[in-house]
Image (spheres, rainbow, N blue to C red):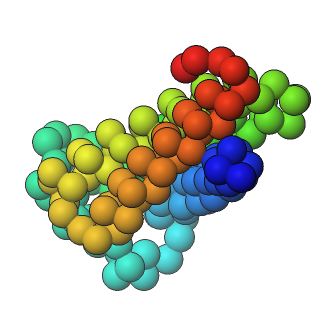
Amino acid sequence: MLDKIARWFALFINWFNGICAVVCGCIMMLAGLSMLPAEMDGFMPLSIYDNFPLHDVFFTSHFWPGLALLLVNGVANIVALVFRFRSDRIASYRWGIAAGILLIVWTGVEMVFVPNEISVIYLVIGVLQLAATWWALRTWGIRA
C-alpha cells in the first residue's frame, strides 16, 4: 500500500511542480520583460529580492528569478515526466529525486534571505517528493 502511495505521489508532484514552475516562471519572465501589466508588481514587488546577494545584478526585474524557477524546479520535474511516459521509471524516479533535492535547496536558500510561509510549505513538499520518489525507486529494486 505504501509503495503505491509513494509511486502516485511521486508522479503527482512531478506534474504539480513541473507545470507550476514552468507556468509561474514564464509569467515572471514576461513580467520582467514588461510584457505584462504593471499590476504584477502589486502581487510580487521587486523589493522581495532586496536581501539576496547580487540584488542589483539579477533582481532588477522578475525575469532572472522566473528563469531560475523554470530551469531549477520546472525542468527536472518535466524531464522526470518525459521518462515516465517513455516507461523508463528508473530514470523518472532518479530525475524526481534530483527535483526533490533541488526544491529543498531552492526553498532553503529562499528561507535564509526571504523567510515566508510559502517557502516552508514548498520545503515540506520537496522533502515529501524526495522521500516518496526514493521509496518508489527502492521498491523497483534499484538503489538510488
Tally the marks: 0
Residue 119 appears in the rendering: yes
Instruction: Specify whether 73 is left or right of 50.
Output: right
User: Picture coordinates of residue 53 (x, y %)?
Assistant: 14, 42
23 in relation to 77, above or below = below
Q: Is residue 24 left or right of residue 106?
A: right
- Across and down, in percent, residue 32 comes to 43, 57
Residue 19 appears in the rendering: no
Q: Nearer the viewer, residue 139 or 94?
A: 139
Task: Determine whether, in the image, residue 118 is placed left or right of residue 90.
Answer: left
Most extreme residue toward the right, as rendered?
Answer: 86
Judge by depth and name the residue closer to the eye, 10 or 78: 10
Q: Nearer the viewer, residue 133 or 71?
A: 133
Residue 20 located left or right of residue 122: right
Identify the residue shown where x is 56% and y is 44%.
Answer: 132
Residue ID at (71%, 52%): 1
Q: Position of residue 80 (x, y in %)?
A: 69, 35
> Residue at coordinates 36% horizontally, 44% vertically from top-left?
104
